Amino acid sequence: MHYTFHWDPAIRAMPQLLWGAATTLEIAALSMIFGIALAIMLALFAQSHNPILRAIHVTWVEIARNTPALFQVYMVYFGLGSLGLQLDSFPSLVAGVTFNNAGYLAEAFRGGLRAIPETQVRAARSLGMTAPQVFVSIVLPQLFRIVFYPITNQMVWAILMTSLGVVVGLTDDLMGVTQQLNVVTFRTFEYFTIAAVLYYLLAKSVTVTARLMAGRLFRY
């Protein structure tokens, strides 16, 4: 082995790598916001008596959980493009990761909804609250408490999934910046080692923040 390590170029590129890490976090956060909204919708579809809505829930969850995340990103970027709806790399990655997040979280939300006693809903309705008021004031707070840790795990997974953006031409995120720097300098080990550390720190910061939040939110 005659590889000579040169860390100076990688250290000098830290501002670019940190900017890429910020973009990675942005993509993951957007995909989680959209994914949570869609997951709640799918969980409600699962409880519907309408067979079409239940079929949408089952189909979405089955595809999201039983196909590679790379396939889902490809289908958004290349699949929609072949149908005449061409999206840029950034929205394609957000949409692909959102699809995956929604599929996994939908089952967590479905289980969370089942864990909330129906008697609470009936009691709230008997007090004159409308169905939307019951859902927002009674159901959602308990639901988010039940699925808090699955959401945290999915956020970590979303951060790691953003690395798939490099296969659809995204160059602004952490993996894209790292790949560009590697192509120019051929310092593969140095740049990807730093990128791995940054991914680890992003993921660890999510879990630590979630633990601190849980200690404050769920003390009772």
Image: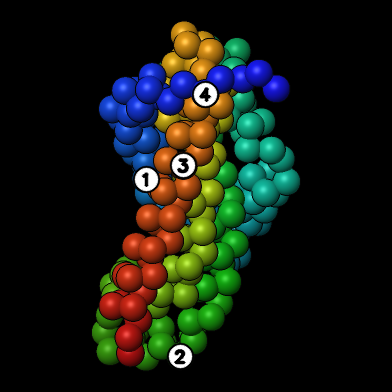
Instruction: Of the two numbered discs 3 and 2 on the same chain, state the one appearing first in sequence.
Output: 2
Mark 3, residue position:
197
Mark 4, residue position:
5
Q: Position of residue 186 (x, y in %)?
A: 53, 13
* Residue closest to the far top: 184
Q: Is residue 28 above or below residue 219?
A: above
Instruction: Of the two numbered discs 4 and 1 on the same chain, state the one appearing first in sequence.
Output: 4
Mark 2, residue position:
119
Kind of residue indicated by mark 4: Phe
Q: Position of residue 82 (x, y in %)?
A: 60, 13
Q: Nearer the viewer, mark 3 or mark 2?
A: 3
Is residue 98 in sight in this rendering?
Answer: no
Instruction: Of the two numbered discs 3 and 1 on the same chain, state the one appearing first in sequence.
Output: 1
For mark 4, does the 10 Å Cα neighbourhood hold few (<14), some (14 to 19), or many (20 or more) residues?
few
Report how far apart the C-alphas of labels 2 and 1 lie in the structure: 35 Å
Report how far apart the C-alphas of labels 3 and 1 lie in the structure: 20 Å
Q: Quadrant of the C terminus?
A: bottom left
Q: Secondary structure at mark 1?
A: helix
Quarter of the image holding residue 214?
bottom left
Marks counted in the figure total: 4
